[in-house]
Amino acid sequence: MLKNKPSIFSKVFKFVLLIAVGILLTFVLISNGVPKWIVFLIVLALYFSVSILWPMYIIYKSTSLRAIDRYIASNYKKPIFGYSYALAHGDKRDVENALKRIMNTYQQQDMADIYGANLALFQNNPKHLLEHAEKINGQEYKDYYLGHTYVMNGNFERAHEHLAKLHTPWMIHSLKAYAAHKRGNPVTFRQEADQSIKSAIGMQRFVMHHTMNRFENGDFNI
């Protein structure tokens, strides 16, 4: 079951704190003779930075797993973040339910098939994994999940053909880690898993970190 869900109080506190800082900043600036229109722009920039720029940085650029975790915990009710939150704090059923929720929420076909491929991967279902992988339009994601399909079936030669087509570092190391785990080589798995995590940034790093830990801990049979 999911645990450590953030309380509503913590979100309200953050909002009140932001308002309080804005009021205090306004008072200090006006007291020091700063024109009101400049004060308005400064406060607006503060709000914009906290509410938009900082979340974008966390989602796409951050390398701090702790910072990403805090942001995800505050937004776990949203389907995309709910999946990441389940990976970090839930059990296998929580992860599967979160993936199904994404597939049922978003209409974009590629998104449904990418997360459907993740669901099939966690369920050790090569048939469904292949079905989703073949329908993905993005070529690199297609090769990435087709590679996983062949690894799952023990066809490492075909998997290597798709591995050779990948250009994104985290994908390359992730697929190599999966192959090493399937072959029963924990040392190589851990090396490649660490490289896949280090190669990723933002939410992708967080997802890779917890996915690899779950594979290593035997949470998912492969």
Image: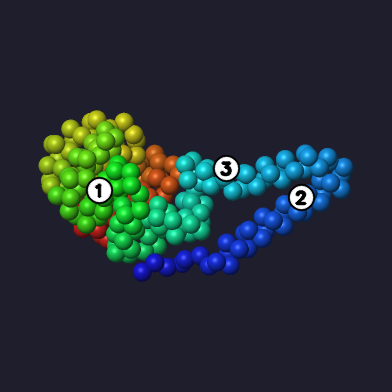
- Where 114 falls versus 94 (above or below)? above
Q: Residue at x 34, y 34 (%)?
A: 168
For disc 1, the neighbor class at 10 Å (few under 14, some 14 to 19, many from 20) is many
Residue 17 appearing in the image: yes
Q: Please give left or right for residue 222 compared with residue 65 in the image.
A: left
Could you say where residue 166 lies in the image, as x and y percent from the top left?
A: 28, 32
Q: Residue at x 77, y 54 (%)?
A: 24
SS assignment at label 2: helix
- Where 115 falls versus 101 (above or below)? above
Question: Cβ–Cβ below 8 Å for labels 1 and 2?
Answer: no
- Where 110 falls versus 73 (above or below)? above
In the rendering, which numbered label is found on residue 25? 2
Q: Amino acid at mark 3?
A: Leu
Please give the residue where the numbered disc 1 appears in the rendered image.
Answer: 117
Q: In front: 105, or 55?
A: 105
Question: Cβ–Cβ below 8 Å for labels 2 and 3?
Answer: no
Please give the residue where the numbered disc 3 appears in the rendered image.
Answer: 53
SS assignment at label 1: helix
Q: Amino acid at mark 2?
A: Leu
Q: Please give left or right for residue 111 compared with residue 35 in the image.
A: left
Q: How far, Cα to Cα, is label 3 from label 1?
A: 31 Å
Could you say where residue 68 lies in the image, as x and y percent from the top left?
A: 48, 51
Q: Residue at x 44, y 42 (%)?
A: 201
Q: In front: 209, or 80?
A: 80
Q: Quadrant of residue 133?
A: top left
Q: Please give left or right for residue 91 compared with residue 165 in the image.
A: right
Could you say where residue 176 lies in the image, as x and y percent from the top left?
A: 25, 41
Could you say where residue 160 lies in the image, as x and y percent from the top left?
A: 18, 35
- Where 182 falls versus 13 (above or below)? above
Question: Cβ–Cβ below 8 Å for labels 3 and 1?
Answer: no
Q: Earlier in the sequence, mark 2 or mark 3?
A: 2
